[in-house]
Amino acid sequence: MKMELDVYRAGAFDRARSWADLNPEERRRRAVAAAQNHDGALLWSLTEAYLTLNGASGTATSPRTLRAYRWAINRYLQYSGHQAVNVLRAASDDGVRFVRSVEAAGLSASSTRVQLAGVRLLYSALRWAQATQAAPFADVKPVRDKTAAWDKRAPYTHEEVQRLLNAANPRMRVLLLLCAHGGLRISEALDLRWDDVVLEASALTVQHGKGGKRRQVVVGESLRAALETLPRNDRVIGGSYPAAVERLQRLCTRTGVPYRGHHALRHYAGTRLTREGASLDDVARHLGHSVLETARIYIKWSDEGLRRRMAGW
């Protein structure tokens, strides 16, 4: 895995140099042509180069983050093409309308912020290439999310998780347990390789967590037993995110469990740990939270004391 990561990072640096080594006028010419032609592949190449050379994470930017930014840029190019927006001369009104169109399409507040970050990065890259001085998203803000953090994607209940596990095939059972017991994000679960699993030590390693971070995860008995039933290929689960979503949706429909996405399984892990007395530090470490305060969300979901006190009122 380290060798693959090194190759990936070296490739990102080489791609960045293909832009950086151009003389400024040629770099400007290519960037202008790409923007005028709505050339998504070339504009992404320019943006990735700028991020690699000037971003805080450099070549350590995670593949997950890169995919999210590329998704945002492609969406903006599609929008600007339909709305006849001149990419190089876009104004703040164009930026506002794009963000409002994203919100109107039903994207969550977090997804809207990703879109905004991606298109801001695109314009930073275009300014770096001296293709434009436009900054149409500089002052644009998404609509404030009025939903409290703890009310988003409430966790599956213990009973719901058990119903899903009882109806799942061996591979799906492992995926459920990686998220619901191991606390892995769905992207981390799909990317997990057998080389990163040590059943004898009841542990696994997440190599590319959020922000490109690496962490050790304790494997419980249920997950360990489920893992032992699977064949040893390259990846433990593998497959695409859309396919994983479809499988979980079908399983939820079959078992009568309301579908809440894979992240609600991760929330179940945090909630259960908190309910069973784990410290916030333990919860944060298990789930890979870089900020301890993030783990406080699970206190709200696990606290039944107020409900019991109010029951007799």
Image (spheres, grey):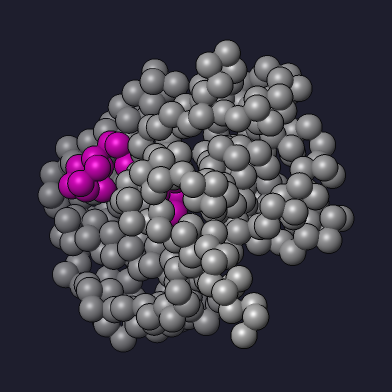
Total tally of numbered discs in the picture: 0
Residue 251 in the image, given as x and y percentages of width and height: 80, 51
Does the magenta stretch mainly form a helix, a strand or a loop?
helix
**Considering depth in this image, is 277 or 10 the residue closer to the camera?**
277
87 sits left or right of 309 in the view: left
**Considering depth in this image, is 276 or 47 the residue closer to the camera?**
276
**Residue 93 is one of the magenta-drawn residues:** no
Residue in view at x 59 percent, y 79 percent:
310
**Considering depth in this image, is 236 or 37 the residue closer to the camera?**
236
Residue lying at the far front of the rendered structure: 312
Residue 120 in the image, given as x and y percentages of width and height: 29, 65
Residue in view at x 24 percent, y 56 percent:
125
Residue lying at the far top of the rendered structure: 200
Q: Which quadrant of the figure contains the N terminus?
A: top left
161 sits left or right of 136 in the view: right
Residue 184 in view of the camera: yes
Residue 244 in the image, given as x and y percentages of width and height: 68, 46
Q: Which residues are magenta?
A: 51-74
Residue in view at x 54 percent, y 59 percent:
302
Residue 247 in view of the camera: no
Res 308 quadrant in image: bottom right
106 over 267 or under it: above or below: below
**Considering depth in this image, is 247 or 279 the residue closer to the camera?**
279
224 over 114 or under it: above or below: above
Residue lying at the far left of the rendered structure: 24
